[in-house]
């Protein structure tokens, strides 16, 4: 009798991995973006997926103001800072915005 050949390989279940960590955005990183940024970056900062960010921008329900120039969407960084409850102007290095009372 001939030996029966196996037609399928044994299933391999790799150990579960942790989901990829989403990047954390520091206030300085957001400010370093410039005046405007793209929808994907703004969505990452707000914790939105790429598809959700574009869907909200197209529907006009993105959490911050959106500037549409043709087929391109731009997000003002000042709007992001306001949505994150951060001040829109950064104090100069070393200067305390609230000096102690005399």
Image (tube, rainbow, N blue to C red):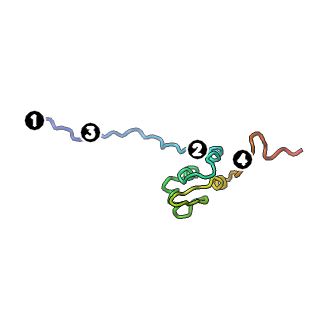
Q: Residue at x 55, y 44 (%)?
A: 23
The reply, left or right, for residue 3 in relation to residue 43 is left
How far is the residue under mark 3 from the one under mark 2? Answer: 41 Å
- Of all residues, the one furthest to the bottom in this rendering is 59
Contact, mark 4 vs mark 2 (Cβ under 8 Å):
no
Q: Which residue is mark 1?
A: 1
Tag shown at residue 24? 2
Report the Cα–Cα distance between label 1 and label 4.
Answer: 83 Å
Judge depth for marks 3 and 1 and give the one in front. Answer: 3
Mark number, residue 9:
3
| Numbered mark located on residue 90 in the image | 4
- Mark 4 or mark 3, which is nearer the start of the sequence? 3
Under tag 1, what secondary structure? loop
Residue at 10% x, 35% y is: 1
Is 11 displayed left or right of 78 in the figure? left
Element marked by disc 4: loop
Q: CA distance from mark 3 to mark 4?
A: 60 Å
Mark 3 or mark 1: name the one nearer the start of the chain: 1
Name above or below for residue 6 compared with residue 40. Answer: above
Q: Element type at marker 3?
A: loop
- Foreground pick, 74 / 102: 74
Whichever of callouts 4 and 2 sits on the residue coming sooner in the sequence is: 2
């Amino acid at each position: 009798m001939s030996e029966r050949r196996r037609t399928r390989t044994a299933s391999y279940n790799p150990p579960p991995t942790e989901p990829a960590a989403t990047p954390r955005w520091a206030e300085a990183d957001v400010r370093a973006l410039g005046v405007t940024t793209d929808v994907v970056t703004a969505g990452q900062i707000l914790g939105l997926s790429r598809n959700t960010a574009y869907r909200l921008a197209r529907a006009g329900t993105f959490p911050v103001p959106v500037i549409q120039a043709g087929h391109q969407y731009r997000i003002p960084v000042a709007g992001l800072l306001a949505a994150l409850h951060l001040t829109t102007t950064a104090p100069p290095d070393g200067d305390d915005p609230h000096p102690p009372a005399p």
